Amino acid sequence: MQTLLAGVLAVFGFAPFGMFPLSVLALLVLFRVWLRSGSAAQAARAGFTFGMGLFSFGVGWVYVALHDYGYMHPLLAIAATLLFAALVSTPLALAGYLMMRVRTSANVRLLLLMPALLVSAEWLRGLMFTGFPWLASGYSQVPDSPLAGYAPLLGVYGVSLAVAVSAAVLLFVSQVRWSTSGKIALGSLCALWLSGWALQHVAWTQPYGDPLKVSLLQGNIPQEEKFSQEMLVGSLETYRRLAQGSDARLIVMPETAFPMLRHNVPPYYQEILREHMRQNGGDILIGVFEKEGGRYFNSVYSLGSAESQHYRKDHLVPFGEFIPMRGALGWFINEVLQIPMGDLASGGDAQVPLAVAGQRVAVNICYEDAFGEEIIRQLPQATLLVNVTNDAWYGESNAAVQHNQMSQMRALETGRMMLRATNTGVTSIIGTDGRVLGQLPQHEEGVLTAEVRGYEGSTPYVRWGNVAVLTLLALMLGAAGKFSRR
């Protein structure tokens, strides 16, 4: 029960609550239970129940998508949500199990094994079944915690490691009191946090080009109407009106703002948008589906002064956008569930930034911005990051604000501004320090207009990716192994 409640407590460290010290406290409770575990099975259960508290409470919005928009029976939707929470909790159970399998001292287990295994579990969760890195503890520190300063060096998992080490050191100090080792540990913890604060004041990248006026469109099209043929004309009219009301040089529409194939968008309508953007001296980015050679893509394409270009989503959602194990499950998805546009193709990982409005824009679609190691593929060439999203699937839950916090981490990691255009929110402009500079109210139609800057140069994370933090984890695990042999 302690670890279940600690998992729930950890959720309050993330957006919209933003009480980042609670993430450290929650891990301290987990580590305390792990330290007192009498067997590997007991430690595995503790890790699993912590995950169940974290994910059942933190990503309970999965229920909204399944029940409200997937029309699943309430009991079945609850069961599916809990099953999902259980699935993504298994890496934490594995971490607890492995921690007890290493025969070493309690201090080595606490200060080396536990932080390294916990962050390794988060990294593994970011890979499982194409990855679900949601609520990695590092996200809770953005943007206000001093530990966020480690993001440009080591990425989100490096920040997670700083959180986990902080929890371990605090627990260690509480046990040894004011002994010499306790004082050294407390001094090291202060140095960790002060260094993070100092790193927040380092300018890793430099402005590129002139200030750029941008407009981000939030059409607020209800999810139940978005793919309705009867409402299509109204959606097109909404986005035409919002776009023509802006004189920005770069205008961005949300993911699948046009819920149709690109070649079906009326030519006269596209010409209206193209001409408007030429008058503005820039370009508009439009979310739409594309078809090529019998394959369908979730795409963004540009119209305006520059030659038309496109970006096609690479990291697809299993079952929502593509069919895993097509031979066994394809008939079920296509014939029984009949998910619209549920069998898309990947655009590939070798795509380049779009040269529009005098900048080089790295576009990412929906939850692609949850994967920092994928965002940096277009860097350092890209000068701006743009995320287009439709989080209307999750109603008025915390999903959208949690998603926005992940974009804040991407801005910090890359030293680039992030522009987020969403259907119902959170539509925002995020600075290179990870702070939100402008934001529209959720679930309202609107246009967010501001001046932004492109940036050039590379943060250490852009150069190293996750290699640096994985190396640190390997060194910690190796050191724990060495102590165990002694």
Image (cartoon, rainbow, N blue to C red):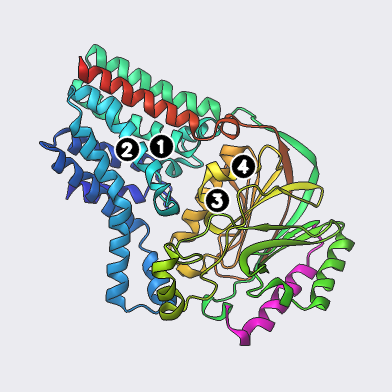
- The answer to which of 350 and 475 lies nearer the viewer is 350
Image coords of residue 448 (percent x, y): 68, 60
Going by the numbered disc 1, the residue's amino acid type is Ser
Going by the numbered disc 2, the residue's amino acid type is Leu
Report crowding for label 1: few under 14, some 14 to 19, many 20 or more residues within 10 A (C-alpha). Answer: many
Q: Residue furthest top?
A: 180
> Is residue 167 something that shows in the picture?
no
Image coords of residue 96 (percent x, y): 23, 39
Q: Is there a contact, CB below 8 Å, between mark 3 and mark 1?
A: no
- Residue topped by disc 3: 369
Which of pointers 3 and 1 lies earlier in the amino acid sequence?
Answer: 1
Which of pointers 1 and 4 lies earlier in the amino acid sequence?
Answer: 1
Q: Is there a contact, CB below 8 Å, between mark 4 and mark 3?
A: no
> Is residue 266 something that shows in the picture?
yes
Q: Quadrant of the C terminus?
A: top left
Alpha-carbon distance for marks 2 and 3? 22 Å
- Residue topped by disc 4: 377
What residue lies at 28% left-to-right and 63% top-to-bottom? 82
Q: Which mark is residue 160?
A: 1
Q: Residue furthest front?
A: 327
Q: Is there a contact, CB below 8 Å, between mark 2 and mark 1?
A: yes
Q: Residue furthest bottom?
A: 230
Snapshot quadrant of residue 175: top left
Which of pointers 2 and 1 lies earlier in the amino acid sequence?
Answer: 2
- Comparing labels 2 and 4, the label whose residue is closer to the camera: 4
Image coords of residue 65 (percent x, y): 42, 70
- Residue topped by disc 2: 118
Q: Is residue 130 magenta?
A: no
What residue lies at 61% left-to-right and 38% top-to-bottom? 414
Which of pointers 2 and 3 lies earlier in the amino acid sequence?
Answer: 2
- Comparing labels 2 and 1, the label whose residue is closer to the camera: 2
